[in-house]
Image (spheres, grey):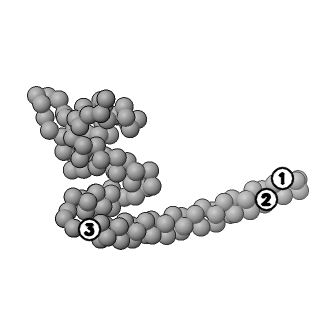
Amino acid sequence: MPTSRWTISDLAQEFSITPRTIRFYEDQGIVSPAREGRQRVYAARDRARLKLALRGKRLGLQLSDIRALIDMYDGPGTTEPQLRSYLSVLNRHRESLSRQREDIDETLAEIAEQERQCLALLDGR
C-alpha cells in the first residue's frame, strides 16, 4: 500500500541502512522530517532526498557535492543547470578515481618487484 509518510524505521528497512544513518543525513540538512510527538515522520521529499544521497554515497561523492546537487533540485527552473553541474561533479570524481587507480597500479607493481627481489635473495641462499 503506497504511502506519502514514512517513519525512520520504514526508511531504514527500505534502504537497508540504520536509523543512525538517516539521523546523520538529518543532521547534515539533507532530510528534514516533521515530528509527531517523539516520532520522526518523513515526507516524499525526504525519501527522495535520502535516495539521492545514498546514490551519491555509492558513487563515492563527497557529502558537500551530494548536498549541493540535491539542493539544486529544490530550486526553480529547468533541470539543465542541475544536469550540467552533476556532469561536472561526475567528471571530477572520475578523474580523481583514475588518479587513484594509477597510484594503486604503481604501488602494486612496486610490491611485486619487492616480492621478486625477496624471493631471489631467499633462493640465492
Amino acid at circle 3? Thr
Q: Earlier in the sequence, mark 1 or mark 2?
A: 2
The x and y percentages for residue 24 are 27, 43
The x and y percentages for residue 17 are 38, 36
Amino acid at circle 1? Leu
Left or right side of 78 for 125: right
Image: 125 above or below 75: above
Q: Which numbered dot is residue 122?
A: 1
Q: Residue at x 58, y 63 (%)?
A: 101
Mark-to-mark CA distance, 3 and 2:
58 Å
1 or 2: mark nearer the eye: 2
The x and y percentages for residue 46 are 24, 45
Q: Earlier in the sequence, mark 3 or mark 1?
A: 3
Secondary structure beneath dot 3 equals: loop
The x and y percentages for residue 34 are 14, 38
Secondary structure beneath dot 1 equals: helix
Q: Residue furthest right?
A: 124
Q: Which numbered dot is residue 116?
A: 2
Q: Are marks 3 and 1 in contact (CB under 8 Å)?
A: no
Query: Mark 2, residues whose alpha carbon is within 10 Å: few (<14), some, or many (≥20)?
Result: few
Q: Earlier in the sequence, mark 3 or mark 2?
A: 3
Q: In the image shown, does 118 or 24 lie closer to the viewer?
A: 24
